[in-house]
Image (tube, rainbow, N blue to C red):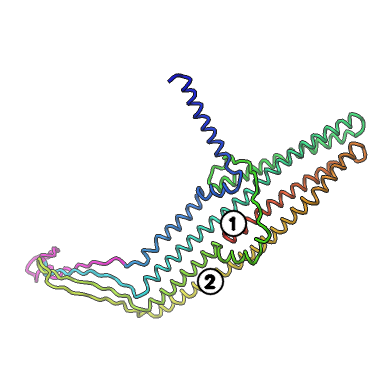
Amino acid sequence: MTAAPRWGVLLSILLLSATSVRGEALLGSGVEELLAYAREHSAELAARRLEAEAAAERVAPAGNLADPLLRIELQDMTNGGSSSANVLPARVGSTKYTVIQPLPFWGKRDLKRQSAQAEAEAMQGLADVSWNELAARIKTDYAQYYVLSRQLDLTRQVLDLVDRLAGIARTRYANGLAPQQDAIRVQVERTALQGELIRMEMDQHHAQSRLNTLLTRHAHEVLATPQRLRALPAAAQLDYATLEGRLQARNPQLFADDASLRAAEKGRDLVYRNRYPDLAVGVSPLQTGGRVSEWGVMLEVSIPLQQGSRRSQEREAEKVVDAARARREAAANELLGVLSEDLSALDAARRLESLTAGSLLPQAELTFQAALAGYETGKVDFATVLDAQRQIRQARLAVLRAQADQQARLADIERLVGEDL
């Protein structure tokens, strides 16, 4: 191979590597791809899934019969005293083999299986709770990451505007139309904005690190600049009565609590079944010398005499069921209260954004344009221009904060109802 083809192959490999790095760095332009990545790579979620799968593997054994027992009895080991003791079955007086199969009372195996199934469903519910909480945190942190990126862009735009104002102030000062104080004041404003820019860059880095941590990536890995926020659902989809029904039906925490309640009920029923005796059956061949000379069968029955202990166990099981039911009701009440708060906060943030973007921001822009024109003609002082510029910036920041609050409340509502709206 000549040198030119080798250089061509090397260049192709480098380009492919660079493309791969750029492709990985593009992760994060939208929250949907972050959620898909987290579902596949999250270590915490993987641990919860494995725990749920482990619990599911307990269901089948719970309803199976216990292993049979083998008992070997050596009788007359000295052959009536005619020989020394021996442990070989063919050289003792007789050897009795007993194979015993324990048989629990009717219905106990089914109750054990149903209890294990309910416990496995509770573990699956907890795995879904983990995913819901992780997804909500990713949605909220992504919205914050988006807002910080937009705040950085806005601050840089304002910094450019302040540079324009500095040019105007210098020109007016050079022409004797403005005091030197105006030029100094605009430099102070510019320095303050640069300080805010540094703080925002730090906050953006922290937000990126938090997202990477949630995604089980290295904290320093680069994320793409966020491009968009999720669209908010229509007001009709945010009806409390409708969402209450969806929460009751699909919330994974309530699903896990329901499963835990069923497991407690099956455990209580099993405790009551312990009032009845368990059985064991067996068959016993008897070996004499080198042959089987006799056969026997056996039936073993447990005698449930300790009624005081059983009554205590039954009362304990009833308390466990009552506690599980109360825990479920308390969780439902708490979740519904949080849902009501989130809906109210989401509506308030939406109205605040509409008011700020539709009324306050246009008014602030008109005020700034009027102040700037007045300053250029000497009708207003420079402080008025700076105040008008700050009003525009504060209004735009308020819009961004309202958008972030809406996204955070929407993420929490979706966490409560157990699905995206």
**Looking at the image, residue 362 lies above or below residue 315:** above
Asked if residue 351 is among those painted magenta in the image, a careful observer would answer no
Q: Position of residue 394 (x, y in %)?
A: 77, 47
The crowding category of the residue bearing disc 1, from other C-alpha atoms within 10 Å (few below 14, some 14 to 19, many at least 20), is few
Q: Quadrant of the N terminus?
A: top left
Instruction: From the image, tell me which residue sits under label 2.
Output: 325
On screen, residue 140 versus residue 374, left or right, reads: left
In this view of the protein, which residue sits in the foreground, 77 or 373? 373
On screen, residue 47 versus residue 341, left or right, reads: left
Asked if residue 89 is among those painted magenta in the image, a careful observer would answer yes
Q: Which residues are magenta?
A: 66-91
Residue extending farthest to the left is: 82
In this view of the protein, which residue sits in the foreground, 146 or 312? 146
**Looking at the image, residue 381 lies above or below residue 118:** above
Which element type, helix, strand or loop, lies under badge 1?
A: loop
What is the magenta segment's predominant secondary structure? loop
On screen, residue 407 versus residue 367, left or right, reads: left
**Looking at the image, residue 8 lies above or below residue 39:** above
Please name which of the two marks, 1 or 2, marks the residue nearer to the observer.
1
